[in-house]
Image: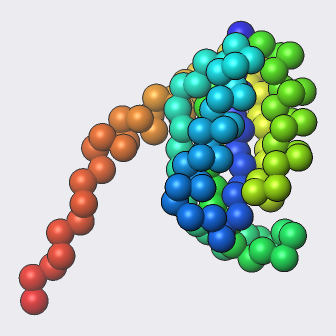
């Protein structure tokens, strides 16, 4: 099993239900093809660096996963033909140093989410 990260940008016009359905769709592709999902990170809606398919904003998601190399071709095929995904990037972590960074990213994000507390409004 190799270590990977997939970042994909969804159309900003999708509703919350459609966003979660598309993320579940990508997770299903990974699990059906022997992938092990470590972490799913929603990064929110952001302004794009340049216009992509007439969109100036997009909703970002990152998934850290382990899988055999055969899964990547199928993942690229499906992400490429899915209309709601306007851009994607798959990164493979190979060296020991990169794998350590992958583990810190995937586990550190989980811990950071638990530690985040809502900000209190300042008293005026």
Residue in view at x 86 percent, y 16 percent? 70
Query: Residue 57, percent across and down?
Result: 69, 72
From the viewer's perspective, tell me whether residue 46 is left or right of residue 11. left
Q: In which quarter of the image is residue 120?
A: bottom left
124 or 35: which is nearer to us? 35
30 or 62: which is nearer to us? 30
Query: Residue 11, percent across and down?
Result: 71, 64
From the viewer's perspective, tell me whether residue 79 is left or right of residue 114. right
Residue in view at x 70 percent, y 13 percent? 34
Q: In which quarter of the image is residue 93?
A: top right
Q: Is residue 4 above or below residue 122?
A: above
Q: In this view, does 60 lie above or below 38?
A: below
Total marks placed: 0
Q: Is residue 39 visible?
A: yes
- Taking the view exactly as shown, the residue that stands out farthest to the left is 123
Instruction: For the N terminus, give its image quadrant.
Output: top right
* Coloring basis for residues: rainbow
Instruction: For the C terminus, give its image quadrant.
Output: bottom left
Residue in view at x 52 percent, y 59 percent? 16
61 or 109: which is nearer to us? 61
Query: Residue 95, percent across and down?
Result: 74, 18
Residue in view at x 69 percent, y 26 percent? 30
- Taking the view exactly as shown, the residue that stands out farthest to the bottom is 124
């Amino acid at each position: 099993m190799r270590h990977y990260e997939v970042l994909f940008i969804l159309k900003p016009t999708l509703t919350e239900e459609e966003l979660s359905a598309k993320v579940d769709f990508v997770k299903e592709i990974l699990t059906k093809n022997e992938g092990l999902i470590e972490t799913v990170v929603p990064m929110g809606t952001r302004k794009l660096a340049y216009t992509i398919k007439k969109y100036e904003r997009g909703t970002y998601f990152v998934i850290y996963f382990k899988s055999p190399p055969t899964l990547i071709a199928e993942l690229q095929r499906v992400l490429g033909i899915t209309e709601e995904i306007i851009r994607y990037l798959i990164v493979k972590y190979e060296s020991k140093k990169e794998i350590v960074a992958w583990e810190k990213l995937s586990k550190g994000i989980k811990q950071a989410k638990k530690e985040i507390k809502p900000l209190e409004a300042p008293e005026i």
